[in-house]
Image (cartoon, rainbow, N blue to C red):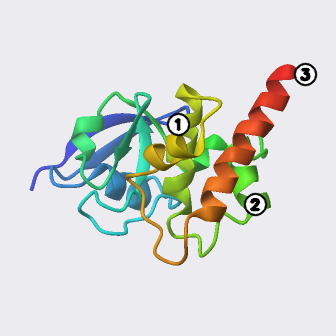
Amino acid sequence: MTKQLITLNVNGERHEVAIEPHWTLLETVRNHLRLTGSKEGCGTGDCGACSMLVDGRLLTSCLMLGAQADGCQITTVEGLTQNGTLHLVQQAFIEKGGVQCGFCTPGMIMAAKNLLDSNPTPGIDDIREGLAGNLCRCTGYAKIYDSVLAAAEMMKARAER
């Protein structure tokens, strides 16, 4: 197969990558850019573990071809950390125990960030809807929901300073 040269803007850095036409964005980011935070849980877009922000939209990267992301702005869970400081959503997940086993955590964090960007004061129903495309297989969602609520409070407190 002939590889295709694409340009990805991932976490603020420009990358030119030669990819096979059938490679997904997830494969490209994990295997070729070595950003392994996003996980492949199902490969069918049902679990959300591979969620990334692509041009500001939350997408399951296992369903998007790498070539479709040519020229796009992509944010992975690694890109939320700035200058060694965790994003408030990441910090809240740690503090409230929302990380649990950790496999779904990157996708949950990306979905939570996406939700909080559009709704900085969500109620529990908003959180359930905002995270609906993400599955946790190890326990209930209570600590995950608590983490999102805590992140919203942390973000509100920071904005008020």
Q: Is residue 33 above or below residue 105?
A: above
Q: Residues within 10 Å of mark 1 (few under 14, many from 20)?
A: many
> Residue furthest toward the top?
160
Q: Give the residue at x 63% y 42%.
A: 80
The image shows residue 89 at horizontal and vertical percentages of 68, 46
Of label 2 and label 1, which has the lower sequence position?
Answer: 2
Q: Residues within 10 Å of mark 2 (few under 14, many from 20)?
A: some
In the image, 140: left or right of 18?
A: right
Of label 3 and label 2, which has the lower sequence position?
Answer: 2
In this view of the protein, which residue sits in the foreground, 8 or 104?
104
Q: Are marks 3 and 2 in contact (CB under 8 Å)?
A: no
Q: Dot 2 corresponds to which residue?
A: 96
The image shows residue 20 at horizontal and vertical percentages of 19, 53
Q: Dot 1 corresponds to which residue?
A: 115
Label drawn at residue 31: none
Q: Dot 3 corresponds to which residue?
A: 161
Of label 1 and label 3, which has the lower sequence position?
Answer: 1
Q: Are marks 1 and 3 in contact (CB under 8 Å)?
A: no
In the image, 12: left or right of 160?
A: left
Q: Give the residue at x 16% y 54%.
A: 22
> Residue furthest toward the right?
161
Q: Quadrant of residue 93?
A: bottom right
In this view of the protein, which residue sits in the foreground, 59 or 156?
156
